[in-house]
Amino acid sequence: MSITAEQKKHFRTLGHKLNPLVTVAAKGLTENLQLEVDRALEDHELIKVKFMIADRELKKQLIQELCNVVEAQIIQEVGHIALIYRPALEPNPKLSNILRAAGPQ
């Protein structure tokens, strides 16, 4: 899965108004958390995940590990927030942050 610089810019613009759907805290990447992120990506395609981890290197490692597990791509990391994207197999126009931004079709 490869996205262009123009798509990344568009996704960052869309992600600006999104709120984090999932928070990763002290327990790290549990199986339930991974399932929740997977479900959120299937519904919304573009989501924010909040990482409540103080250590920067550990946070970067967890973001990369999460993206590898759920087969998503990192769009942007700012502070404790990661914006990640994975195209849905069958996007729902009412839930997908990408399709909703495009408007009625």
Image (cartoon, rainbow, N blue to C red):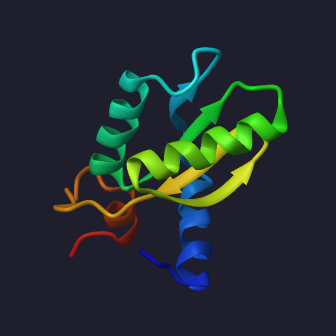
Q: Position of residue 82 (x, y in %)?
A: 63, 47
Q: Is residue 9 above or below residue 4?
A: above
Left/right of residue 2 with respect to residue 98 in the rendered view: right
Q: Is residue 57 above or below residue 44?
A: above
Indicate the quadrant where residue 6 lies.
Answer: bottom right
Q: Position of residue 19 (x, y in %)?
A: 55, 39
Q: What residue is drawn where x is 62% and y is 54%? A: 16
- Quarter of the figure that contains the C terminus: bottom left
Q: As drawn, which residue projects farthest toward the top?
A: 26
| Count of marks placed on residues | 0
Indicate the quadrant where residue 11 lies.
Answer: bottom right
Front-most of residues 48 and 66: 66
Front-most of residues 102 and 54: 54
Q: Position of residue 86 (x, y in %)?
A: 39, 60
Q: Is residue 24 above or below residue 4?
A: above
Q: What residue is drawn where x is 60% and y is 65%? A: 13
Q: What residue is drawn where x is 79% and y is 42%? A: 79
Q: What residue is drawn where x is 21% and y is 60%? A: 91
- Quarter of the figure that contains the N terminus: bottom left
Left/right of residue 36 with respect to residue 30 in the rendered view: left
Q: Position of residue 89 (x, y in %)?
A: 20, 62
Q: As drawn, which residue projects farthest toward the left?
A: 90
Left/right of residue 53 with respect to residue 75 in the rendered view: right
